[in-house]
Amino acid sequence: MKKVKIVSFLITFIQCTAVLIIPVAISFTVPIAKRGFFCNDPALSLPRLSDTIPNAILVFWGFSPIFVLLLCEIVFNRKTCDSNLSCLNVSWRNTSYLYHRYVINLVLMHVFLFTVKYCTRSHRPHFFETCKPDALLTCKDGTFVQNYTCTNKQASFDIIDSSQSFFSGHAAVCFYSCTFIAWYLQKRIKSRNVLLLPLVQTLLISLAYFGAISRVFDHRHHVIDVTVGSIVGILTCIHAWLYQCRTFANDFQSLPSTCLRKIAPMPSHNGDSNTNATNEG
């Protein structure tokens, strides 16, 4: 059984690695398209600011659901296990079952994100400051400039990155991870408290919104970039639950519960007592 799990893990790892190679292959095979701009466009004239959420924190954010899932599963299963070891084994099995599908969709979203960024070549709000196009000195306001050369002496990566605004990867990752956890809690927690679960879900969505909107305040993205990135993150979450979890029922409300077929919901003690009383009667 362990050999089967190890082989399955290796196959998944190879598949994810192969998929991640696609963006690299695109960068080496597809010529970089130079997108023009309107002279002295105010939307591209903003100064470059430091990131509120650096890329390192974003990477941790994107992979952090494994800790949330494992912690929740340990809490949910602690009363139904015979020992701490068995509780940990069951919790890890349930966590790996869900996290496996989460990571696959995260990789697919990354490929789609990189492809769109590379093909659209949309300029960031700080494009003029980073690129310093030579045509900006001679063009007239409002005229469209197609032929130009970046005169900035910075590293070429910064110049290329200044034309990868659409769409926001930060917004996509933030909304994908937070929506995934919110959906998980909705199907996992069976509580009669009408405030606790909606409050936690609201905090998760608020956290995702903060991560997304910070890219506008940092002058890294336009509003449309963040909006589309947020939508892509939510759609990726829906794909993770409805497709990767093999849920193809007609009733939308019952779809996610199929994904948790290996995970028994928390029993309601009041409901059990009522059931026992009914059976005894």
Image (tube, helix red, strand yellow):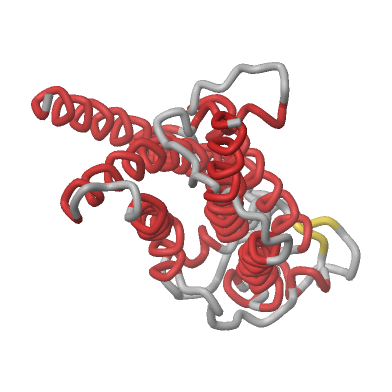
Q: Is residue 279 visible?
A: yes
Relative image position of residue 146 (x, y in whole percent): 73, 51
Residue 134 x/y as whole percent: 65, 69
Query: Extreme right residue here?
Result: 142
Screen quadrant of the C terminus: top right
Residue 67, given in percent of the width and then of the height, sits at 36, 59
Q: Is residue 267 above or below residue 66?
A: above
Query: Is any part of residue 164 visible from this angle?
Result: no
Front in this rendered view, residue 179 or 124: 179
Determine the residue located farthest toward the left in the rendered image.
3
- The correct choice, above or below, for 167 with respect to 223 in the image is above
Tell me: 188 left or right of 140. left
Relative to 248, residue 233 above or below:
below
Residue 100, picture quadrant: top left
Q: Is residue 12 above or below residue 24?
A: above
Q: Residue furthest front?
A: 281
Q: Is residue 108 left or right of residue 226?
A: left
Residue 144: quarter of image: bottom right
